[in-house]
Image: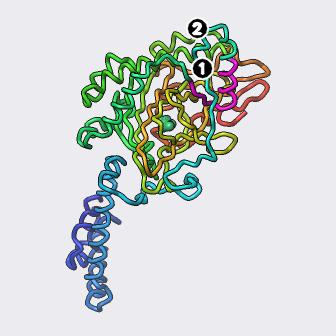
Amino acid sequence: MLSLVWVFLLFPHPLFLLYIYPLSFATSIAPHTNLSLSLSFSFSLLFTSLFFMGAIDVSVIAKTEGESMVKREEERMREAEYLKGVRHLCDTGVTKVPSRYILPAPERPHIVRCGDISSSHNLKLPIIDLSLLHTPKRAVALEALSMACKEYGFFQVVNHGIPSEVIKDMIDVSKRFFGMPYDEREKYMSSDLRSPVRYGTSFNQIKDRVFCWRDFLKLNCQPLESVLPFWPSSPADMRDKTIAYANGMKSLFKELMSAILESLGVSKKVLSEFDDGSHLMVVNCFPPCPEPNLTLGMPPHSDYGFLTLLLQDQVAGLQVQYKDEWVTIEPVPGAFVVNIGDHLEIFSNGIYKSILHRVLVNSLQNRISIASLHSMPIEKVISTAAELVSESSPKRYMDTDFATFLNYISSTETKKKNFLESRKLTCTRDQTTEGQLC
Ligand SMILES: O=C(O)CCC(=O)C(=O)O
């Protein structure tokens, strides 16, 4: 059947139109039967008569067929170019956003002035001074942490103990990675969600109907010794700089989780699960965009893990949803933005919420951000802490695991918080059922 389609596409010639097409058509209706021969004969007769009566203008058909073939080929080539990423697209000198990246009007960001991310909608997130955790003021810091997790689901941390050199080097090597020629970056392209290294573009380039203005390098960091040989070997210092950064992120995550468990009033036994927990580093590159009000660097989404630790260079772009509004997070030099992920929302029985966020792009500056997503080992089941479930506060989420999440994202277009929504339970006095909100 497929080969017959090719015959149609490849040979817009009168002979084909009058004899081969009818035969193909008839064979597809009634394959391998005498009926196909007689149908074919009848169609040929009909087409021949129409041809000689001038009712079929083969030159018009052939031209139309030829034109649509060229269009299809151009479309295929454009799509192949888009898959090379926005950095590559910018290198070709685009001056307008191609339609593949243009969001439907209601999903577009409202950027007041082109190239500038509106300052009227900026939000100063709570800033937690982590050095206080090691002083008699620990209780004050825990109270601030708890308030930030409940009210915003996002906060910034300072005095976190990660050397400024390690931070600077990571941003610097990331910029140099995305600055390499496309052929170098392409080596790490993979559509396998479990691959230890994955270079790509958009949010989910296989599923996205509208592409995002982002390229990324995803590095699995667990277990470090086994994934390391797969990480990019250029720039030459990429691995060393990234190892130092990844180790820093892991200890910062564990320190934050210890404080968060304390703020929730639950046992810290679970902390040991994070020693070999999943750790994914996502290095994002958002090149300048000629029409930033038509597209997004990343669409609204929440993160799957317990916590995400985000390093952004000093270019604003991250927006979080706060009281039904999109607000921009102002970068604070040397600080990390921390946000609650879906797994912590499940673990805390919804006391701490994972919040939707998205990324704006701008017309002037390249932006780099590095997100470190942490959770338990991928084979572990995430369930709600027993201490947080009671008759007055029933379990609100189904247990979940990483495999379920991966299956979910590879089978749907991940928009908004729909994975977490799919884990919610309906609570009644004595039973819980899947699928609806309490
Ligand atoms: O670039 C940012 O500010 C946020 C990145 C992000 O949300 C992500 O990588 O999941």
Q: Secondary structure at mark 1?
A: strand
- Residue 61 image-quadrant placement: bottom left
Tell me if the residue at label 2 has its CB under 8 Å from ligand 1: no
Residue 106 shown in magenta: no
Q: Quadrant of the N terminus?
A: bottom left
**Rendered position, 262 above or below 423:** above
Dot in front, 2 or 1: 1
Residue 311 seen in this snapshot: yes
Of the pair 87 and 128, the residue shown nearer to us = 128
Labelled disc at residue 118: none
Residue at (51% x, 46% y) in the render: 360
The reply to whether the C-beta atoms of the residues labelled 2 and 1 are less than 8 Å apart is: no
Q: Is residue 155 magenta?
A: yes
Most distant residue in the bottom direction: 53
- Taking the image as shown, residue 317 lies to the left or right of residue 263, namely left
| Amino acid marked by disc 2 | Lys
Q: As shown in the figure, which amino acid type bears the numbered disc 1?
A: Asp
Q: CA distance from mark 2 to mark 1?
A: 25 Å
Magenta highlight range: 143-157
Neighbor class of circle 2 (other Cα within 10 Å; few <14, some 14-19, many 20+) is few
Q: Characterize the magenta stretch by its predominant secondary structure.
A: helix
Q: Which x, y percent locates residue 342? A: 58, 29
The quarter of the picture where residue 425 lies is top right
Q: Of 104 and 76, which appears nearest the observer?
A: 104
Instruction: Name the residue located 39 percent from the left edge and 31 percent from the top edge.
Output: 171
Compare residues 149 and 280 and report the one nearer the observer.
Answer: 149
**Label 2 belongs to which residue?**
269
Q: Position of residue 79 (x, y in %)?
A: 34, 54
Q: Earlier in the sequence, mark 2 or mark 1?
A: 1
Q: Which residue is mark 1?
A: 129
Element carrying mark 2:
helix
